[in-house]
Image (tube, rainbow, N blue to C red):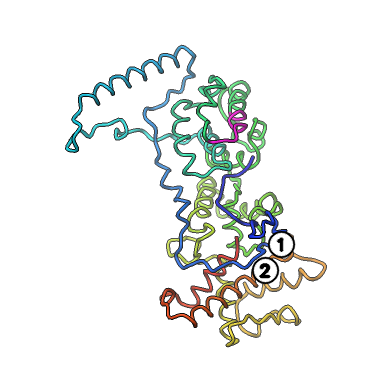
Amino acid sequence: DASPFDGSTAGITSGGGGENGKSGKSGINSGRKKAVKMGERDEKQPSISKYFAASVSGAPSSKPRGRAQRQEEKTASSKEGEEKKEEDDCAPINGNNNTTTTTANTAADPIPPSAYGTWVSEIMLQQTRVEAVIPFYLKWMESFPTVHHLADATEDEVNSHWAGLGFYRRARMLHSGAKRVVTDYDGVLPDTVEELKRIDGIGQYTACAIASIAYDKCVPVVDGNVCRVLARLAGVANHIKAPVFKDRLGWDLARQIVEAGDGRHAGEVNQALMELGATYCSPSGSGIDDRDPLKAYYKSTRIGREIGQRMRGNGDGVFDDSYTRSGTSGSSRGGDFDMDEFVGVARAARGREFCKLCDKEGISNVLFDISQALSDESEVSSNSSSTANASSSPDDLAATTGHAAFP
């Protein structure tokens, strides 16, 4: 039950150490990160919202199709193609053709939200980018608009619609699961997480996604994108893919957000967190974009700002790490609760107890990454006549650097 591809490179080091940074240095970063430029966006990951209105032609029937009906549909489709070809043969071939009515431009009804549609989309998005899934999803929902249609399909038909997505086991499990839903649940997916997990190919993540999005059950959904948002909101110094984070304690953090208030609209909240993790809070997100609804709440940017302030207060552009050697938290130098709390956990990590959610060396690495990146930026600015960052205030630059230090 792998969660969707999030575009993250957390844990992948230049030394090829792998997910846990085993190239010689433990912690969330084996090498110093460069400060993310102000306002930079990840162009390879488009906004998921641009696909929300995606549609297919025709309204699907709720009745299952038999082999004879499928053959009739194929014959009708073939006839339509021949008629279209005849029209094209008679159409003008110059560039002044005023004919605007085409199959691609005709109005179509959007795919209605459903538990089945959510299930299909979540399975397709496992280990696959959103923009790659869209055309496959549209084609799939046009051919198999309900769980009955999928259960009635042949293995060859299912595989032909999956060809190009890879990981064919996902298609087989989806097909097998559809048959069980038809047999055991009368074609209606269950609305509880525990019942959903009884179906082939549905694990904790997919079950929670279906339950919250389709049935508005108050349960969290945690994937890499959500973990990134949580890490930056709460100052979690760990890989977003660390098991203790994405498989255990990250769910507790996400549950606090989903259950806040009256706990209603959990599906919308979960989708919003995933959307934020793919857009404004992507790996290249700045954390200070005015369009980011969480701009005022990121602990990552507040920690970055305070480190920048302390470095500038020293006058030498070097972060004073006396807090790690003395019995004080550095509060005498000024600053807010976020920095002192962050430092306090770092000190505790050197004793018998430390935060189980953060990597043991994660906080030290975050502090090093931020201070080193700011020192490098200061040196470059002082030795260069470039005005590229002239419009960026020191506080904003420090905030962006702090945001980038959390995966």
Amino acid carrying label 1: it is: Asp
From the image, tell me which residue sits under label 1: 359
Mostly what secondary structure, the magenta segment? helix
Residue range corresponding to the magenta coloring? 165-174
Which comes sooner in the sequence, label 1 or label 2?
A: 1
Are there few (<14), some (14-19), or many (20+) residues within 10 Å of tag 2? many
Horizontally, residue 248 falls left or right of residue 267, namely right
Q: CA distance from mark 1 to mark 2?
A: 10 Å
Residue 387 in percent (x, y) is at 41, 77
The reply to whether callout 1 and callout 2 are in contact (CB within 8 Å) is yes
Amino acid carrying label 2: it is: Asn
Q: Image point 46% across, 77% down: which residue?
A: 393
Is residue 169 on the magenta stretch?
Answer: yes
**SS class, disc 1:** loop
Q: Is residue 102 above or below residue 249?
A: above
Q: Using the image, tell me which numbered label, if any, was put on residue 365.
A: 2
Q: Image point 46% across, 11% down: which residue?
A: 68
Q: Quadrant of residue 166?
A: top right
Q: Disc 1 or disc 2, which is closer to the eye? A: 2
